[in-house]
Structures are given as structure tokens and as C-alpha cells.
Image (tube, helix red, strand yellow):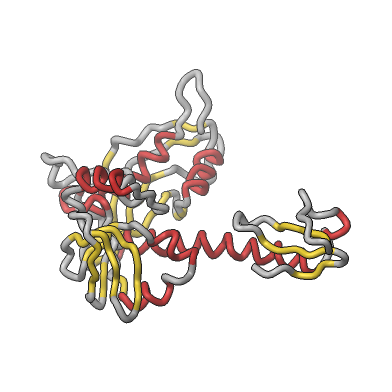
Amino acid sequence: MAWLAAGDYEVTLDQDGTVACRNKAGRRLKAVPPKLKGDPAVARLGQFTEWLAAHERQCEADVERWMVRSLPVPAAVLTAVWPDPAWQAVLRDLVVTGADGAVAGFLRGAEAERGIGVVDLDGDTVRLTDTEIRIPHPVLLEELAELREFAVELGVDQRLHQLHREVWRRPAGLDQQATQLDSYAGGRYPSQRELLGRCARLGYRVRGGYAIVQLADGAQVVEARSWLGDYYDYDQGETGPLSWSGPGGRAIPLAEVGPVAWSEGVRMAAALYAGRTVEGEESV
């Protein structure tokens, strides 16, 4: 980034996003002089840094939504955003598939003329020409263990942690009529406020006494809901049953919950349960 005039100095943004300063002789200073704190150029750089951080968070949230909701992503969108370092940092090295759902490999590039570049499972660089790609949820990857091993060999470090995201698979032998899972109920917190605070830190919305996450289950959108208790019962904080609901609020039997909806719902309930107070310890 270019250097900007700021009084008797010049300022710019370093690669780590901090404001750097140098004097007229070109010598970099260890810190921005206090008298420049209110300089318009320094203020603009600070605002730009905040915008970049918010942009990076939004990119990660958008790509995570594509993965969790199994949304098809137009190849044209990838080629449009790829030059942006914030988008590229999140997208690079994610496992992607073609429109048919067959695993293609690790995403390495996106160009309008050449297509979507990936490193396949043989270690070769190939190009996808599909008009849409998918970023599959890890629970849908049948060869997840092998992909994890191959990622280590390639030195892959996913920003979104697709391959190393916690996954839960629906066990066999469930009661065909049951509509709620009690495995993560009974996690006690010192107060309702602390339980709600953990929901906020984990990024889960709270509505009507439930922590919720919206998910794609095939062609329909479903909602995983983990009971938190009455909002006005301040002195009690305890995790309750987990359930799933479909369009119109219809309760979905556990045996009918799809793999992604199951994994993400249990992931939420397990994370809330993990913050419970264990005797002799404090909640985290």
C-alpha cells in the first residue's frame, strides 16, 4: 500500500494490518507518534483496517453458509471473488466437487478463461469447467479420513477447517417415533445469562428459549433447536433436549433427519453442553 502524508511523517498499512510510520528521511519508526493519533490519514487507515477485518469475517461466514447449507456455487462467482485476498484466503484448499457431487479435489484457483483449478486426489492439477461447484459438508465426504491424510501430505491449512470440522453421524436403531435427543441435556450453568453468553460467543441465534441453526436437509430448510430454558428464569441455566423442525414448525422424527442437519445440530448441542459447570470447575 502507498505511503500517505501525515504532518511531518508518512503512514501506511503493514501486511499485518497495523499502521506503520516513517519520517521524511524514510526511516521507519517503532510506533506512530502520539501527535498523529488524530491525523485524518491515520484515522482513515484505522477505519480501513476495521473494514478489512469485517470483510474477512463476512467472507468466512458466507463460505461456511455455502458449505453447511449445501448450496451450489456458480463458477462465475468464484472467478469474480478469487482476486480478493480475503475471499481467496477462505476458499483456497477447500475440498470441492463438480455439479454431480463427485469429489474433485482441493481448490487452488479460479479463472474465467481456464476454469476452476483443483489438485485432485492423485496430486495432479486439473480444471473443472462445470458452471456450478459445491463445497460439501465433511459429513458427506465418504473418504473423509483419507482426505485428511492427503491434506497433511499436501501441507493444506484450511482457513474454514472443512476437513477438521467436528462431525456427528446419526446412530442406527433410533426410536422411529422420537422427535428429540436428550444426550446433551442437563448441562448446568451458574445462570441463564452465562448460557446465553456462550450461545453468543459460538455464533448461535437464540429465539423463543432455543439456540437455533438453520440447515439444508435435501431440498428443504430445517432448523435444529436446542432448548435453553425460560429467558426470564435468570437463576437457572441448563441445556435441554435437541430437536429438528421443518417448514411450518413441523417436528421431524430423529430417524428422518438428514446427515448434515444431524451433524450440525448435534455439534451445536455438544458445544453448549461442553461449557457446563463441572463440580469443582468453572464454566468456559
List x then y, in percent, for residue 146: 20, 45
Q: Which residue lies furthest to the front in this view?
A: 25
Q: Is residue 131 visible?
A: yes
Q: Is residue 249 visible?
A: no
List x then y, in percent, for residue 135: 29, 62
Q: Residue furthest top?
A: 280
Question: Hey, which quadrant is residue 24 in on the image?
Answer: bottom right
182 lies above or below 160: above
218 lies above or below 206: below
At 82% from the left and 67% from the top, the residue drawn is 6
192 lies above or below 75: above
Quarter holding the N terminus?
bottom right
182 and 200: which one is in front? 200
Left or right? Give the position of 78 relative to 18: left
164 and 197: which one is in front? 164
Total tally of numbered discs in the picture: 0
Q: Residue furthest bottom?
A: 113
List x then y, in percent, for residue 2: 68, 70
List x then y, in percent, for residue 68: 32, 58
At 19% from the left and 60% from the top, the residue drawn is 103
At 43% from the left and 64% from the top, the residue drawn is 88
Left or right? Give the position of 211 relative to 130: right
213 and 71: which one is in front? 71
